[in-house]
Amino acid sequence: MPFCSNCGKEAGKGITFCPECGQRIKEEFTPEERQKYIEELKASMDEKKRAGKELKEKQKGEEEERKEQEAEVRRRQAEKWLKKRPWVAVIILLVIIEAFTGFFWNIMFGGSSSEPATYTPPQEFIEIDAGQLYQEYKSNEIAADLKYKDRFLKVHGIVQNIGEDIMGVPYVVIVEDEDDWWGVQCMYPDTDAYRELLAKVNPGQEMTVTGKCKGSILMTVLLEHE
């Protein structure tokens, strides 16, 4: 019985074209010829798979290289910015010292209450864009605190960064424009559920964060998601 020389499918007698791929059927097709075509077809398919895998690995490597280059550019821009403003580095150092001091002070003297914490859901969210909130704090921090601090906000913007602070607490920074350096930083509870949620967030996408406003520090408005 003849076989298709293109795909190797067995064809019935008297069939002129392969019902599988449309190739013209050879009148006489020996088992050896059939096996040869099957091996050649398999080799061709393996080669296509290998080429596809190499292409994916190449694209992945190029994407990782692009991200590394972007990170390096941002790092250099930050270094250049800090060199022009050395006082910012001093403030950052003081904030880190204060954070560690307060953390260990609470451990040694504050303790933790055995009573479960109670949560009162907010009655109302103030909706605002990240750029507007940042500009209000930049223009007059005292006035902005009176208006927003310790109140629940719903802030819209573009994701600029996703990461962890020095205590390992996850956060998201949203800004008005992708090129902005400063905006609104929302801190999230350090739980597996929130980490899985933040793992799906990508820089450049639009996002709305909610939380209690904690004021401004180092030209960034802080929110605590509750």
Image: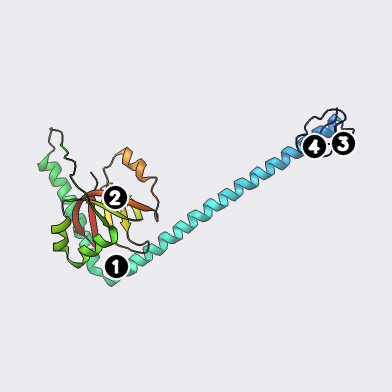
Q: Which residue is mark 4?
A: 37
Callout 4 touching callout 1 (CB < 8 Å):
no
Distance, label 4 to label 1, CA atoms, is 67 Å
Horizontal and vertical percent for residue 68? 45, 57
Q: Given this view, does label 4 or label 3 mark the residue nearer the observer?
A: 3
Q: Given this view, does label 4 or label 2 mark the residue nearer the observer?
A: 2
Q: Given this view, does label 2 or label 1 mark the residue nearer the observer?
A: 2
Q: Given this view, does label 4 or label 1 mark the residue nearer the observer?
A: 4
Q: Which of the pair 67/151 is nearer the observer?
A: 151
Q: Which residue is mark 3?
A: 26
Q: Which residue is mark 2?
A: 209
Q: Which residue is mark 1?
A: 82
Residue count near mark 2 (Cα–Cα under 10 Å), binned few <14, some 14–19, many ≥20: many
What's the residue at 53%, 53% (across, down)? 61
Which amino acid does the dot numbered 3 rest on? Lys
Which amino acid does the dot numbered 4 rest on? Tyr
Position of the N terminus, as image quadrant, is top right
Which amino acid does the dot numbered 1 rest on? Leu
Residue count near mark 3 (Cα–Cα under 10 Å), binned few <14, some 14–19, many ≥20: some
Up the image or down, 198 lies above or below 161; here it is above
Distance, label 4 to label 3, CA atoms, is 12 Å
- In this view, the residue farthest toward the right is 28
Which amino acid does the dot numbered 2 rest on? Val
Q: Which of the pair 1/152 is nearer the observer?
A: 152
